[in-house]
Structures are given as C-alpha cells and as structure tokens.
Amino acid sequence: MDSIVIQGGNKLNGTIPISGAKNAALPLMIASLLTSDDLILENVPHLADVESLIRILTNHGVDYKVEGKKSGETSATGRTIHFKAGEIVDTTAPYELVSKMRASFWVIGPLLTRMHEAKVSLPGGCAIGTRPVDLFLECLSALGAQLDVEAGYVIGHANNGLVGAGYRFPKVSVGATHVGLMAASLARGQTILENAAREPEIVDLANCLNAMGAKISGAGTSTIVIDGVEALHGARHRVLPDRIETGTYALAVAMTGGDVVLEGAKPNLFQTALDSIEQSGTHVETVENGIRVHRNGNGILPVDITTAPFPGFPTDMQAQFMALMTRAEGQSRITETIFENRFMHVQELARLGAQISLDGQTAIVTGNEYLTGAPVMATDLRASVSLVIAGLAAEGETVVNRVYHLDRGFERLEEKLTNCGGNIERVSG
Ligand code: UD1
C-alpha cells in the first residue's frame, strides 16, 4: 500500500491550481442518467471517486469519452468528459460498486424518475458516522415512489412516473437535496423542496440541470421550486472549483507560513472558512486569478469554529482547521455538528505531539508551537489531508499510511505541494 513521506519545515511559496470540485462533479455525472443526449462536463478532476462513479454509470449503460488535451492546456487543466446515457440497460447499482462511495447511491433519483424503477445497494463511503438514507427515501416517497429495503438494497418503483409534491427535509442533507432535484426534474408537476441544502455544489447541479432544460429556481436558498419537464436534453457545463481543496491548501500555508496563490479559487464558495483562517492571523486577499494566502513570521491565533451546513463552516474542512489550531498560541474549541464520528484524526494528530481532548462533539485543542514528525494512519478522506498539512509543518519526517483515501478526493496532491516547496513524496509499497 502506498504511503506519503513528508520532511516537514518548509514554507510553501508559489501557485497551486485548484481542481474542479469532487462534490460537484459526482452529482453532475449522475445527472447524465437523466437524458439520452450527451452531457459534456469540463474541469472534471482526476480522482478515484470519479473513476468509481464512471464504473457505476457504465454499468447502467452510459458511454463516456474523455477529450484529449488541447493546445495551451497543461496537466493542471481538468478533463472534459462526454457522458451519454442513450439507453439505460440496467437499473441495478450493485453492492460491489456502490459500497466504495456513498455518493453512488444518488443514482437512485435519476433511475426512478427516468426508468420508473431502481435497485440500489445501500451505500458505503468514509466511516465518519452512521450516514443513513432515510431522508432520500422520505423525499422520493413524497414524489410517489414505492420503496422497500431488502437484503441491503433499496428497491424502488414508480409505475406511472414520479409526481411533483411539497417536501420539507427534517434535516439538511446535501445528498438528499441532489437526489430530490434530479428526481423532481422529470416528475409530473411542481415540486417544492424546503429546508434544502444550500451548498454551492447544489447550485452547480441546478445550473447544469437548467442548461439541460429543467425548470429549477431557488437553488442556493433553502426553498427550491422545480417544475417537472417531460424530457431533458444535452448540455455542456463546467464543474465549479473545489472549495474544500482550496481551503485545505489555504490552511497548509497558514500552518507552514509562506505565500501562495490558489489559482482559480473563488472566495464566495467558502467565505465562513476564509474568515476563520484570517482570524488565525493569516492574510487572505482576492487577486485577479484566485486567492492569495500568506503568513510570514506572525504566530497563529486560536479560533473557535463550529461546523454547520452552508454557509456555515464546512465539516469537510474541520480536520484541516484542527491541524492548524494544534500550532496556535492558545486554546481553541472545534465543534462538529454534522457527523457524529468525525474526530478520528485526533489520535493521529496526537502522535505528532498535538494536545487535544474531546468533550462530546467538541475538541479542545491546546496549541503548541512545535509538532514532531511521526508515522500516522489516514482514516478518512479529509482526516488524511489534515495529517499531510500537519506533517508539512512538523519537524522531521512524517509518514502517512493508507493514502488511498487521499486519492479519492485530492488531485495531484504531492505534485501541487512539491511545486510550492513542500518536501513530500509518494512511496509505493
Ligand atoms: C456531502 C458531501 C460530504 C460532506 C457532507 C456534509 C458529497 C459527495 N459529499 O455528503 O463531503 O461532508 O455533504 O457537507 O457531496 N443524513 C441522515 N439521513 C439521510 C441523509 C443524511 O440522517 O438520509 C445525515 C448524515 O448522516 C449527516 C447529515 O445528515 O449527519 C448530513 O449529511 P449529508 O449532507 O447528506 O452528507 P452527504 O450528502 O453524504
């Protein structure tokens, strides 16, 4: 199994190109199931999760074609991929494929609305909590689907097609909102989704669906209105930049010190997190081609954060922010409200010398100027990258094991950090 070996202590200086967002690319790819025409997605990141989803989509009958490199493009440019679900030949998403990644469960929405049937394995993904699917089932039932859970599969039918309805999510869910949007796009009549997720990736999906002929308004607010249409057509859509990747590199610079431009990044996609990064004493400014982050000399100030649905502080940046706080001049409190088991990085950060105690859903971090390199174990996607950025700031060598989690969500991580002076390499084993 590969590991990542980091010699800590170097400041980061230079430019890091930001990739297309994994969490937007996945639902956009799934939206290709809604039309028999071509859906062309630009700026698709090269990630293990994207490849897993391609395997699932091809099993349903989707053809795909990756465009070759064009003149002027560099390896930093995301790929353009054509998806065509001319005919859906299989409405089952099997366990072997879905168990690898939770988002693959979301195919249930397009399959039910276009094919009126679906059999989808209950999902897998990062072990950060129980992550049930009750909200998906409730929302799809509200649209008229008959759903049963049998032998690890959700089996759904909508013999006469889905029918628009009002549905209020009892809890904000990104995935269930994506599925509700896709399912309602081809339902008969109007659907009103209340207490919907407001994440930028929801807006990106709604924009793409509208380009495909859907009638969706209100995405980005908690009430989304969808007027169902009979059919959707092809479109060309560019995946928005990855705000979690952006925030992660911003936090890496905050930790190590240095001066980096995050090329293509958009501050409005994660303003709350940027504000917290600034409060820690790091300078953040919007520049023509992205966001410049720099910290030179001054210490790191402690900042309390609480994760929340967008526009709150993203849970996907909690572990990385905790890594920064381990070096702050004082104590900070980090409260996780989205997932019940998202502190698995705490014991690994402690191996680097971090002082963290847990009080229920709050981690109390006592900052300490020096971290020391050590072997650590990646436990989930975002936790893994928190160990990488802590390793960059630690003295000596850090070896991050089980890096397959990183490959699920961070494109060319070692290359991007090495280009800015980080001493980091992948060792095959
Ligand atoms: C998405 C993101 C993930 C991010 C999360 C929260 C993708 C591919 N993944 O995951 O990176 O961490 O949003 O911002 O976009 N829940 C239920 N019942 C359900 C569905 C969800 O109780 O049917 C709970 C979950 O267990 C969790 C909370 O709702 O506690 C939020 O989860 P949700 O927003 O659905 O996360 P995902 O869509 O899985």
Image (cartoon, grey):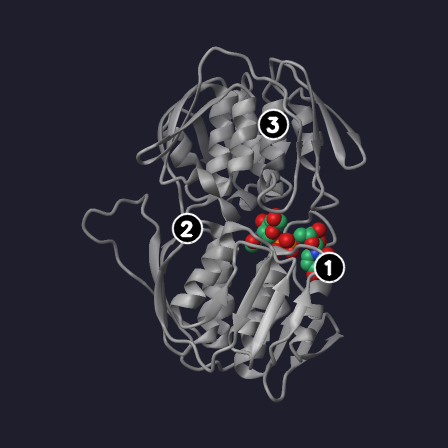
Q: Residues within 10 Å of mark 2 (few under 14, many from 20)?
A: many
Task: Give the vertical position of 108 relative to 169 (above or below).
Answer: below
Residue at image coords 53%, 70%: 226
Q: Ligand 1 within 8 A of label 1's CB?
A: no
Say whether marks 1 and 2 touch (CB < 8 Å): no
Is label 2 in a helix, a strand or a loop? loop
**Residue 423: % across, % down:** 43, 25
- Which quadrant of the figure contains the N terminus? top right
Q: Residues within 10 Å of mark 1 (few under 14, many from 20)?
A: few
Residue at image coords 47%, 74%: 34
Task: Give the vertical position of 227 relative to 224 (above or below).
Answer: below
> What is the three-letter code of the residue carrying label 3?
Ala
Q: Nearest the camera: 229 or 55?
A: 229
Identify the residue under disc 3: 323
For the residues labelled 3 and 2, the Cα–Cα distance comes to 26 Å
Q: Residues within 10 Å of mark 3 (few under 14, many from 20)?
A: many
Labelled disc at residue 276: none
